Image (cartoon, grey):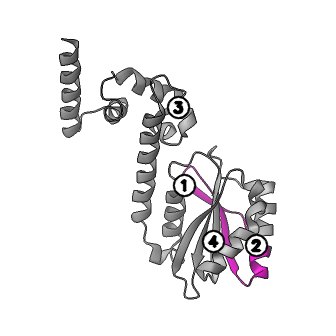
Amino acid sequence: MQKKLHENHRQRQKEKFRKGLLAPHEHVELMLYYPLKRINTNEIAHELMNDLGGIKGIFCSDEERLMQIKGVGADTALFIRNIAEIMRLYELQNCHVEELLSSEYELYKFLNALFVGACNECVYMLSFSEKGKLIAYDKLSDGFFGKAVIMTRAAVKQAMKAGAASVIIAHNHPDGICIPSNTDKLSAEKLTDAFASAGIAVRAHYVVADGKCAEIL
């Protein structure tokens, strides 16, 4: 009897979804049906929402943090992180990369898309050809940007391998504060000098946070 009620509840929730009637926590509950096929996911959904700060917090949490929620195991955490990555790829595909150097709006949209679902502070490099075409974008570092100087040689080597004439560097502030720190400025200067030595121009260096971009240099 309990199994029947469980199945009926899930079916009702699926019908509510098709009618656009689900509340935010119910969308999370529905998402959890697939990695957790025989468990009541309502309570887990509420805990995820409450403990992690809502939808954004869920998809910006790493696997270790997700697994601190009772009922969330390794497979479920991986499932959630994969959805976050799909969201990131979706946002990137919605950007007009041919306009990155001619439209501040498109550049900011692209930079923000890079960090969708980011759990940690990380660094990306956009490489451009002599004609200003985006030829590559690479994650250079996953961690505190102040330590990014460690990967300076690798960054320059990667840009040269791509045939870049110029680059844009961006890193995120997961705390949502879109203000460059003194450490950010010093690290950005060192990176700029290293690229200049290799004949590659750094067009700009940005901090990205909470849907905003702030130029460091």
Identify the residue under disc 4. Answer: 168
Q: Nearer the viewer, residue 49 or 2?
A: 2
Residue at 35% in and 32% down: 32
Q: Along the horizontal axis of the image, is 73 left or right of 139?
A: left
Q: Name the amino acid, label 1.
A: Phe
Q: Along the horizontal axis of the image, is 36 left or right of 67?
A: left
**Measured Cα–Cα span from mark 2 to mark 1:** 22 Å
Q: Are marks 2 and 1 in contact (CB under 8 Å)?
A: no
Q: Name the amino acid, label 2.
A: Thr
Taking 125 as reference, is 7 above or below it?
above
Q: Is mark 3 on a helix, strand or loop?
A: helix
Q: Residues within 10 Å of mark 2 (few under 14, many from 20)?
A: many
Identify the residue under disc 2. Answer: 192
Q: Is mark 4 on a helix, strand or loop?
A: strand
Residue 160 shows in this picture: yes
Q: How crowded is mark 4: few (under 14 residues within 10 Å), some or many (20 or more)?
A: some
Q: Where residue 60 sits: x, y (%)?
A: 53, 42
Which image quadrant is residue 186 in? bottom right
Q: Residues within 10 Å of mark 1 (few under 14, many from 20)?
A: many
Taking 134 as reference, is 6 above or below it?
above
Marks 3 and 2, the one that precedes in the sequence: 3
Q: What element carries label 1?
A: loop
Identify the residue under disc 3. Answer: 52
Q: Do the residues labelled 1 and 4 touch (CB within 8 Å)?
A: no
**Stretch in magenta:** 194-217
Q: Do the residues labelled 1 and 3 touch (CB within 8 Å)?
A: no
